[in-house]
Amino acid sequence: MPTVLITGANRGLGLEFALQYAADGWRVHACCRNPSIASDLAELAEGAKGQVVVHRLDLCDFSAVDALADELSSEPIDLLLNNAGVYTKGGYAAAVYDKAFGKSDFEDWEKVFRVNAFAPMKMAEAFVDHLASTEQGKLVTISSDMGSIGLNSTGGSYSYRSSKAAVNCLMRSLSLDLAEKGIIVALLHPGWVSTDMGGPDADITPQTSVSGMRGVIESLKPGQTGCFKSYQGKTLPW
Ligand SMILES: NC(=O)c1ccc[n+]([C@@H]2O[C@H](COP(=O)([O-])OP(=O)(O)OC[C@H]3O[C@@H](n4cnc5c(N)ncnc54)[C@H](OP(=O)(O)O)[C@@H]3O)[C@@H](O)[C@H]2O)c1
């Protein structure tokens, strides 16, 4: 039974990843900030009888990341999914419609960077041995086409865009540095998805997005390490 560890697994894309991998027979380590209110995850874990384990993990707390890595030290992890992410204080409207220029909240910006860029790097550092101890470890980070500099034709969203561009850069470097350990590193854009972050007008459901991403993850080969792809498998520009 392969093993996946997912951050931000209590709602949105993270929850859907947990549901789909569990249904497919994977062992799932589902991380979330507050298990006591993660009712959908609790229900999944209860029905899965030990196959799904819920862990408390706030990604702003790097000592908690180390503690979880220690707790799971004997467990090889086939797939580490850096899924958790934040947009910005005030959400999409604050970031895009007023363009936020001249109103930058740099304190909030630091928090966005901590979750979207530093935490995926910290997770990679903490769990590298777990990934290296499987036949084909995969480190996959849910990025965004909004982190693509080449695709930016609308401006705004400074903190979110820059944090996703940063994580793209970090994961690309990691793909080169971890190649000798046999770990495949990839970045995925999930599409515009109807979650709390994506809102109700989004193009696709979490089910469609996650099914697509799982297909892309499954098909990743060592020669593709360092790629940036959409949920449909299309290579995206940096
Ligand atoms: N939805 C889209 O259209 C879209 C498009 C492009 C990229 N993405 C990316 O896809 C990923 C998942 O997004 P989503 O749409 O599922 O968003 P979401 O519905 O807003 O869920 C975000 C998840 O991240 C978790 N999270 C936030 N800060 C955290 C922290 N400090 N520690 C641990 N967990 C934290 C949240 O936990 P809490 O419940 O505790 O807040 C929640 O589980 C993100 O990386 C996002 O940037 C989404």
Image: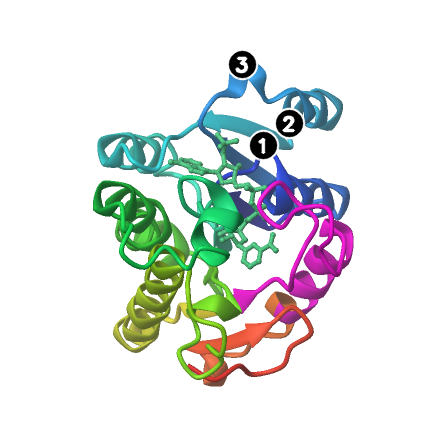
Q: Residues within 10 Å of mark 2 (few under 14, many from 20)?
A: many
Q: Is mark 2 within 8 Å of ligand 1?
A: no
Q: Which residue is mark 3?
A: 36
Residue at position x 65%, y 20% in the image: 39
Residue at disc 3, secondary structure: helix
Q: Could you say where residue 129 lies in the image, as x and y percent from the top left?
A: 31, 53
Q: Quadrant of the C terminus?
A: bottom left
Which label belongs to residue 34? none
Amino acid type at mark 3: Ser
Which label belongs to residue 41? 2
- Compared to residue 100, the image places residue 28 above or below, namely above
Colour scheme employed for the rendering of this structure: rainbow
The CA span between labels 3 and 2 is 10 Å
Viewer-proximal residue among 53 and 117: 117
Q: Earlier in the sequence, mark 3 or mark 1?
A: 1
Q: As drawn, is 46 to the left or to the right of 154?
A: right
Residue at position x 29%, y 30% in the image: 64
As for residue 156 lying within the magenta part, the answer is: no
Q: Earlier in the sequence, mark 1 or mark 2?
A: 1
The CA span between labels 1 and 2 is 6 Å
- Compared to residue 78, the image places residue 177 above or below, namely below
The extreme top residue here reads 36
Residue at position x 56%, y 28% in the image: 53
Residue at position x 52%, y 49% in the image: 93
Q: Is mark 1 within 8 Å of ligand 1?
A: yes
Which label belongs to residue 10? 1
Quadrant location of residue 28?
top right
